Image: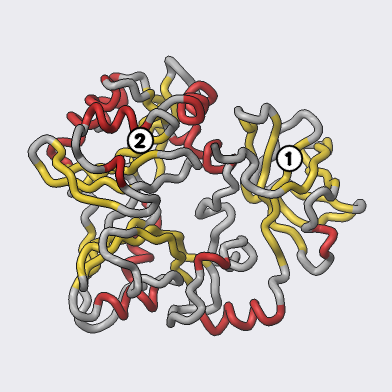
Amino acid sequence: MLEVHQRLGAKLTEFGGWEMPLNYKSTGVIAEHNAVRNDVGLFDVSHLGKLRVRGPGAGDALQFAVTSDVIGLPKRKARYGLVLTEDGGCVDDVFVYRVADDEWLVVPNASNVAAVADRIEGSGVEVVDEWDRWAILAIQGPRSFEIFDVVFPGSGALQLKLHTWSYLDVGGHTGMVARTGYTGERGFELYAPSEVAIDAFEALLDAGCAPVGLGARDTLRLEMGYALYGHELTTDINPLEAGLGWAIAWDAPFRGKDALEKIRSEGPARRSIALACRDRGVPRQGYEVYADHQVVGVVTSGNHSPTLGTGIALALVDARDPRHTAPGKRVAIAARGRRIGADIVETPFVKKR
């Protein structure tokens, strides 16, 4: 795939051990972002991990490794979950796909494949890294259904519900298509066998998809308020602080459950909040957040929102004073010797259609 991105004029960056397109020189981040919001964009996200987990002990091992209910997940459905440390910190966030009674596909972030695999442990379980078997292509945007049906007519993908998946033919090979994504727009993620991945990518481009890089992927997910590993999710931040309590199956056994139950009973000391800037300026990770003339937190993700035309951010702040997390509260973000006025708002920053 690298040669295809180079031919398209991609500005490449190292990401999780992969060379990935940050953006394409003929368009740029803002144009690529707007293509996804208003038309249809195509991402190569093949850097994501692909772990095949199977065997008679796979269900119990995976259930202990992930916070969501994976044993109760029906076949051909997918579910978001978290992999934790014993004290409740976030090792990674993953999507889990149920393949068969004793088989799942787990998709972690590229830099955390080994860490996630190491935490799926137990007797009667096999964890196979299939990084070279699949390319993952994300087709996202209002016209994604139209374009997908042109390239893969009669695949049945258009009938899939959100977070479900099915098999389909990709150039004479068996692939997978899932109603998943991380942009807030409707669309699909196509698991294309490596042998035919370039053909599938080029066919989608020819049908009308705009190539989109990691730069726009970040602004798109931020506009939706989605957490990103290394920013809102780290081993020093637990899911309740990150606002991801909905991804926890409290009735299921999982690593870190005792620690999280204690945090839930006492209340998290910090919370993730959303900030929309009133003043000009772009908030960045690490900038301090001020409320009532004191530092109350730090920005975990920040950028310019192409859709809103202003700076937006997610920040982790002291939750002991409820005023620091209340929507409507005015705060300031310290940015290179000046302060950017901002309001605490609710996510998503951009409402879904």
Please, what is the three-letter code of the amino acid marked with disc 1?
Ala
Neighbours of disc 2 within 10 Å: few (<14), some (14-19), many (20+): many
Does residue 303 sit above or below 3 in this rendering?
below
The percent coordinates of residue 240 (x first, y second) are 61, 68
Give percent across and percent down for residue 26.
43, 15
Residue in the picture at 24% in, 32% down: 1
Q: Position of residue 172 (x, y in %)?
A: 8, 38
- Residue occupying image coordinates x 50% and y 65%: 247
Q: Quadrant of residue 71?
A: bottom left
Q: Secondary structure at mark 2?
A: strand
Q: Is residue 49 above or below residue 258?
A: above
Q: Which residue bears the numbered disc 1? A: 276
> Which label sits on residue 84?
none
Picture coordinates of residue 150, whole percent (x, y): 24, 27
Query: Looking at the rendering, in which quadrant would you find the C terminus?
Result: top right
Circle nearer the N terminus (2, 1)? 2
* Residue bearing the label numbered 2: 139
Residue at the spot 63% in from the left edge and 83% down from the top edge: 262
